């Protein structure tokens, strides 16, 4: 590789890293908005303005991220096939086993990430449920599987799959090793399904199933 090509490659990597960080902040902005409203002592957190701003922000982010993935994905998206649904079924079984085996080991208190999300769910139940079940599966899959693997590990997809799972676990901030392990294993399953199907929609469906199950269990565990 010539020096000019090396410099161009380093330049591209630099901008990919900057873009990746900015997209992470954008992806987190709906949660930041709800968190800010939660801390507000004004009537804003119970207003229609919050609902409109939150809904518009979510739609804008989903459209932006899906459009960008379509332009930057390193391989062509495959159509849904019978094999795709088999992989979805295997992934769903794996995700269910991860939840069943590790959920009892996760500490019910002291988990800052879980506690913060619980506060948001109790304060903004409808917005949070819609966001967690419909929006998060799209934005997190596009971000962690789509952007991370395609942008930084185009020639080493399996390595990207493993590291994306590690990053996925670390980003769900917690000192509980079992909580981290559950997210890491979930990330591995999602990364595997993405590489096997070459279709991010399978990941989104699996992530949707996982979040729906988590919220359903969380609602059952809330004491009246």
Image (cartoon, rainbow, N blue to C red):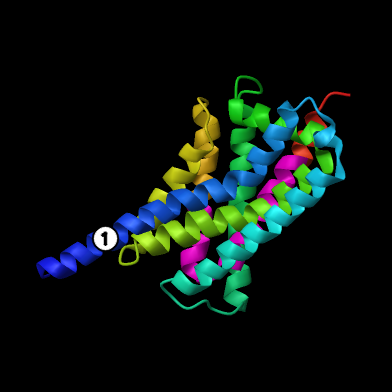
Query: Quick one: 11 or 159, which is closer to the camera?
Result: 11
Q: Position of residue 69 (x, y in %)?
A: 51, 67
Q: Secondary structure at mark 1?
A: helix
Q: Residue at x 72, y 51 (%)?
A: 133
Q: Quadrant of the C terminus?
A: top right
State the residue lying farthest toward the left.
2
Query: Quick one: 50 or 131, which is closer to the camera?
Result: 50
Mark 1 — residue?
A: 11
Q: Residue at x 75, y 41 (%)?
A: 215
Q: Position of residue 81 (x, y in %)?
A: 61, 78
Q: Is residue 106 visible?
A: no
Residue 148, by quadrant, is bottom left
Q: Looking at the magenta stretch, what is its main secondary structure? A: helix
Residue 89, by quadrant, is bottom right
Q: Is residue 64 above or below residue 128?
A: below
Query: Quick one: 214 or 68, which is closer to the camera?
Result: 68
Q: Is residue 199 magenta?
A: yes
Q: Residue at x 79, y 29 (%)?
A: 221
Q: Quadrant of the N terminus?
A: bottom left
Which portion, as a residue range, is magenta? 188-215
Q: Residue at x 78, y 41 (%)?
A: 216
**Horizontal side of residue 24 vs 101, given as left or right:** left
């Amino acid at each position: 590789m010539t020096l000019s090509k090396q410099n161009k490659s380093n330049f591209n990597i630099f901008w990919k890293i900057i873009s990746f960080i900015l997209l992470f902040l954008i992806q987190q902005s709906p949660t930041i908005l709800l968190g800010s409203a939660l801390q507000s002592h004004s009537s804003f957190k119970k207003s229609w303005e919050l609902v409109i701003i939150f809904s518009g922000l979510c739609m804008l982010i989903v459209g932006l991220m899906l459009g960008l993935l379509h332009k930057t994905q390193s391989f062509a998206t495959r159509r849904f096939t019978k094999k795709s649904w088999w992989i979805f079924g295997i992934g769903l079984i794996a995700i269910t086993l991860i939840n069943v085996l590790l959920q009892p080991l996760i500490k019910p208190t002291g988990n800052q990430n879980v506690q913060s999300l619980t506060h948001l769910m109790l304060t903004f139940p409808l917005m949070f449920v819609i966001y967690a079940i419909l929006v998060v599966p799209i934005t997190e899959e596009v971000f962690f599987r789509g952007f991370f693997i395609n942008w930084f590990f185009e020639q080493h997809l399996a390595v990207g799959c493993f590291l994306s799972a590690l990053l996925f676990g670390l980003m769900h901030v917690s000192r509980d090793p079992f909580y981290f392990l559950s997210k890491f294993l979930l990330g591995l399953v999602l990364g595997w399904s993405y590489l096997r199907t070459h279709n991010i929609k399978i990941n989104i469906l699996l992530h949707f199933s996982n979040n729906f199950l988590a919220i359903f269990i969380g609602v059952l565990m809330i004491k009246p």
